[in-house]
Image (cartoon, rainbow, N blue to C red):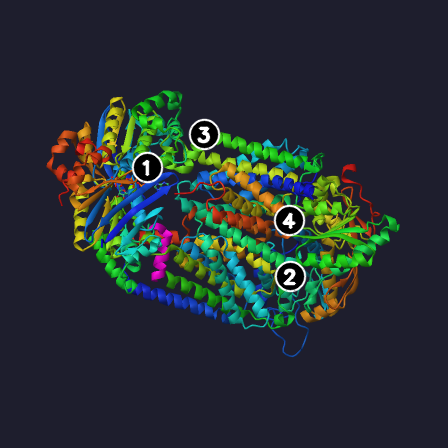
Amino acid sequence: MPFLQVEGLCKSFGGLKAVNNVTFDVAEGQIIGLIGPNGSGKTTTLNLLTGFLKPTAGAVTFKGENIIGRPRSQMCPKGIARTFQIVKPFLGLTALENVMVGKVYGRDSAKSLKAAAEESREALTRVGLADKARMLAKDLTLMQRKRLELARALAAKPQLLLLDELMAGLNPKEADDACALIQQIRQSKITILMVEHIVKAICALSDRIVVLNMGEKIAEGTPDEIICNPQVIDVYLGRAHA
Amino acid sequence: APAPTATPVPPTKAPEPTKAAVAPTTAAPTTAAPATTKPPEPTKAAAPPAPAYIEIGASIPLTGKFGSLGQQVRPGYAYAVKDINDAGGIYVKEYDKKIPLRLTVYDDESDPTKAVSKMETLFADNKVVAYLGGAASDMHVATTAIAEKNKVPYLGIAFALNAIHQKGYKYLFSPFPKSVQQGPDTFTILNALILDQSQRPLKVAIFQEKSDWGAEQGALWKENAVKNGYTVVVAEEYAVGTTNFVDLINKAKAAGAETLLALPNQPSGEALVKQMVELGWTPKFSLIIRAPENVTWSTNLGKNGDYVTIFPGWHNGMKFPGVDKLNAAYQAEFKRPADLLTGPSYACVQILAAAIEKAGTLDRDKIRDAIAATNMTTVIGPVTFNPDGTAKVLDPLIQWQNGKLEMVWPKDQATKPLAYPAPAFDRR
Amino acid sequence: MLEALAQNLVYGILIGALYGLAAVGLSLVFGVTKFLNVSHGELLMLGGYASFWLFALWKVDPFISLPAAIIFLLVAGVVFYKLLFGRMVKLAEGDKIQNTLLVGFGLSLILQNLALQFWTADTRSITTAYSGAVFSFAGVRFPLVRVASLVIAFVLIVALQLFLRRTYTGKALRATVENWEAATLMGIDIQRVYLLSFVMGAALAGVAGALVAVGYSIEPAMGMSWTLKSLVVMVLGGLGSITGTFVGGIILGVTESATGFFLSLTYREVVGLVLFLLVLVFRPQGLFGVKEG
Amino acid sequence: MSRTSPEQSRRIQIIFILLLIAILVALPQVIKSDSTINLAVYVLLFVSLASSWNILGGFSGQTNLGHAAFFGAGALTTRMLWLSGWNLFPSLLAGGLVAVALALLIGVPAFRLRGVYFAIGTLALSQILYITVGNMLPMISSLPAQDLAVYQLAPRYYLFLAIALFTIGAGYALINSRLGLGIMAVREEEDAAESLGVSALKHKLVALALSAFFGGLTGGAFAFYHVGYYPQLTFGPEWTFDALMMVYIGGMGTIVGPIIGAVFFVILRELLALNLAEMHLIVFGTLFILVVLFLPGGFMGVWGKISKALARQQ
Amino acid sequence: MLKIENINAFYGDLQALWGISFEVNEGELVALVGPNGAGKTTTLRVISGLLKPRAGNVRLDNRDLGKEDAHKIVELGISQVLEGGKVFTAMSVLENLELGAFVGRARKVRDETIKWVYHIFPRLEERKTQRAGTLSGGERQMLAIGRALMAKPKVLLLDEPSFGLAPILVEQMFEMITEINKQGVTVLLVEQNVRAALELTNRAYVIENGRIVGQGTGDDLLSFESIRSAYLGDCNA
Ligand SMILES: Nc1ncnc2c1ncn2[C@@H]1O[C@H](COP(=O)(O)OP(=O)(O)OP(=O)(O)O)[C@@H](O)[C@H]1O
Ligand SMILES: Nc1ncnc2c1ncn2[C@@H]1O[C@H](COP(=O)(O)OP(=O)(O)OP(=O)(O)O)[C@@H](O)[C@H]1O
Ligand SMILES: [Mg+2]
Ligand SMILES: [Mg+2]
């Protein structure tokens, strides 16, 4: 039984089929890349997996349990955490408090606020924000906010982590650092489904890649297979990457 | 054309009442004088030194939705106090001297909660021996209860609500016609003024405001209409503040109603008349209590405001001692004779002054008893009180005629005969 | 029966047009500037008094003096904007709403009590020679001044709509609504856009006030209830939709009026508000609003 | 300048607060002027009302323009039960609970709405109650003469003091709890909070219920205090707007803000009212605007800036 | 043509730029690169007048822009495309373009400019009546640039035009930028995609922590070891 199983997932907005009959599996401990042109339905897929949107049709099973139709606030305690393409920090709270929310409400939540604060400090250290703990999130830079969001999701002790364009807006060097961080997360047995436009990064990290175009899955395979797939080159990668 | 009127400058001590009153009398009982002024004389038990003033006070809605009523009430108090003080004050036997009145007026913004705190301040800081009332029953409800609680006699006008007098309050007195009087008066006056039975406006429409006073007055109208040979053809309720009377007017018109009885506040009152004009319904006789008490009624509505009658409790054409003087003072300040509510508020102070003089002391309970025993003639005519604090007073019927308020009842006081029947709006 | 109902509906539409007009001014200002001007009702009152005094002192017909009322409110609008509201432009949206609400509250206290000092608490209204005039159609009476008010309100709304849709300035206004920074980068002077929408809102309030003085009556304390009514209508129609707001006003007017007819005059406003809430429950963005996000 | 450790400054804070409470408790024994006590009652009333509004408006970020409905429901319930012979405390509790029931009834549909829509929706709700209560209960509610004869101010004062402390304490406990953290997370970013396991609806409902409960209690105290009023009065929009102004001017989403706001607002207005008659609202309005223009972010906002600057100097 | 001298800029108490100076000559395509939070966007905001510097000045053709409001600066010939290409979502593509020509100078030649923009971005002509809010990420980015071109700028400031775009679109985007530059518009480009940007540009400035720390031709910088390690990365983690 696969860790996460997505079957025949569909979502339409009015007449637009944003996600159309998408099927794929994720095995425990893997990193799966999700790529595709702008507007191909990647974020929508993540929203469907986390209960932010209700699918028009299809099934999602997580650890053998159907999670479609569950309130989105129940996903995290079950072990699914996510980040957002457009970061959504709690602007008026401190960095530490941001992470504490994940700690207190996530899976396996902390016993007391004090304990939560302790553990949250560790999570901040892990993403390199230890010295920013008392700063308000609104005073952080975009990159710091992205790291904060990652720390927040990690604090919830997820088994499955969904990352939506964590590296957008980073220069290649910074993206490298982010890659290292993700590798490190994988060490702690967290399964990752990541959306990214930085082809190099996603190829380096992913065990398998799923490609969407206009809501449909057009390819799935190892990074090497995907890079050479003519259809993927045509709609997504362009000549430069061929 | 109406010009913006200046607001009266009352001869009160509005600006610094608190300080002035508190300083000398903080720890002493109301009637005592500051101990420091004179060393006590141990041997002779002489009369206690007299206070400099007899403190009285009022919390009046000078702003907010009842502001227009309060603005008529305040000058009545102010002029009466001035007249009394010009004559040296009130003779108080206990001190064997005349002591002037000092009136403190606060604005309660038409908010009963603020009125309560103002009343408490008057009691605690100014140590008033009596309260004067504000205006409108919303406000009196709160303030009379405070008077009762503090055991301070309270004289208030400009509310016709009778229910408030049925609570067993001992300190509340109101020299103002109540609904129980106005209900029967409506029809007895009509019958007395229109002797030819066939001419009487027997079909009655009642537009009743959804309020305690509205219900009280409406029920009394219904009851007394039947007793006097009238039929109520329409009796409808509307919420306070309504400005759309189309359906009521259409019903009354369809039922051929000849008399309109209503008690709308503003802005309902003017909206009612404007829509009656538009829908072409002219009752032969209309008694619209409250909204037309506004001095601007006629300038606002022009000829359409004529023929409407009211029960305001007073008119500046009354032939009682003191009315001329009051009108003159009012004329000097506001460029018109005294307003409807000014007379009754002037009378309150007259009644109070007489009671203090009769009591011969500033003890509140004695003053209260003296008020209860009032039997005198004031600017509103003869006044005596019933045990429940309501009064036996005249209930004059006033009518707008040619843009002026004329008194059409009682006959011996009347300034003009009743204009009846009202001609259709489009033929004025 | 049918005639009476028709008569009822006519009055519902006529008052609804005033609700709509008052709310459009508030909505325009809120939409563009995110200023929640709770002294809107007091601006309406000022318009009413302007019209009233022109009539009372110099017998200027209220419909002829409308431009004067507009100018008076334009000037007042500029003054209030320069003195008070203009300082809020740069704040974040939440702070802007909060601070303009506070300033509006203070301003409404001041205006209401200044009006009281200048003009006393007495109600005022305008009755012209033709005030009672009506024309009848199929047994239903159409009061002339009210119909004229409706026409004026309608013309103003259409003109405003054309202005916003067709002219460059109108487009600049709509652009500023969405993103003032991007609008600035188009070369739009957003300070001027804010000022413009604020004074246009004030002027619309002024016209509404003048029409209220003719059809109903005015007094210093009237502002609050008009502000509340305008807020409800603005949301009922849907933020950002001028026509929607106006239509929302008429719907509210008709609902209130019909309630009086079918149910009871005492629950007129209650049913209107219940309808409003039902609309919100089923269309959280209002009748004509666009769903956010 | 010697720096105080966090623990030290915390101890100083606690001593200061206890001292303040002691003064407030002693007040009626020391000050014999009923007018001062009345003013204090009025201040405490608004401290409670503003603080209770702040629980929903400040901590959870939902601008509720219908708070008067809770105040009114509490007042109406308490007054009816108390005057019908119930003991005071059960009546008060019932008032608070009725307000909570009302809150839960409207909560689910109301929280479908966002921003201005929520604000005006709640305003409409309270207006519906305002008009309906006016229609259904047009009779005055004044205390019977025998109650007035034994009316005492001091117990009323202590009741208001207790409720104010209770409300403030509850607010403080809330924001320092797990629940409070969730509530503030929902305020800041609903989607993110949900993605971390915070149920936005549930947390908003908790904030609403608490806000309603204390609003209702305050209304109940008002019912016990006030000698005579129309039941409709307590549902009037002024209760909401006054409380909201106090929170805004004091500092939203803080514990101290509503307290400072209420003290400033009530005392300033009262002082002006006693000294300036009809002009007082013009002056009050002007002062109020000046404060807003020169202290954006309210008193607490300015305090935050000052303490930041001080911290940097040290 | 565009000259920036000793700019210090602040957000509240926080200093974001420390004495930045550089210049862009007529017809050039110059890139500004640097890590996140270095102050690239802030620099563009200072040039376009959205943020007023505390010290230093910005000159366009020797005219001091320090006292000018942001909207006036657009009129003088500088257009900025915001990070994330903020289009007016409630309006049609055409209306967005029309607003781009708001300033008087551009309004006169509006119809011609639209033709020119359609020539560069044929996609926009296909979508001209569509509501901008329904465009895909790449189309939005095109519209944002097209809208800025409508003002007939002398200098175009581009802030991360490739942000969040699929690789194929990134490629197209850079082609279009070169095309625009060839048509005579001076371009100042902020890009995270450092390699592509440097390959494209005449000259580039490197900014770090609010200070200019390096400059040179694109090729020079590409071959610098420090630049390679700091910005180009290899992602072979
Ligand atoms: N709430 C919504 N309502 C209507 N349409 C939507 C909604 N959310 C997404 N869409 C549309 O669905 C399609 C897929 O969007 P999605 O956000 O999933 O794209 P994406 O693959 O994440 O693209 P990108 O790489 O640009 O982030 C797009 O055409 C988008 O416009
Ligand atoms: N509105 C703001 N308020 C406060 N500080 C800000 C604001 N905008 C930016 N900053 C700060 O100014 C500094 C420079 O930011 P800027 O946005 O110019 O960087 P950037 O080089 O464009 O980075 P990025 O690649 O992330 O877009 C950063 O430290 C950032 O946190
Ligand atoms: Mg996406
Ligand atoms: Mg940037």
Residue at disc 3, secondary structure: helix
Residue holding disc 4: C262
Does dot 4 land on a helix, a strand or a loop? helix
Kindly tell me whether mark 4's CB lies below 8 Å from ligand 1.
no
Residue under the point 61% across and 71% down: D147
> Which residue has dot 1 on it?
E51
Considering the image in quadrants, where does the C terminus of chain C appear? top left
Residue B31 on image: x %, y %:
64, 70
The chain to which mark 4 is attached is C
Residue identified by numbered label 2: D139
Q: How crowded is mark 1: few (under 14 residues within 10 Å), some or many (20 or more)?
A: some
Q: Of the numbered discs in the image, which one, if any, rests on residue D192?
A: none
* Quadrant of picture, ligand 2: top left
Q: Quick one: B125 or C38, which is closer to the camera?
A: C38
**Which amino acid, mark 2?**
Met
Please give the chain letter of the residue carrying mark 3.
Answer: C
Residue type, label 3: Thr
Which numbered disc covers residue C169? 3
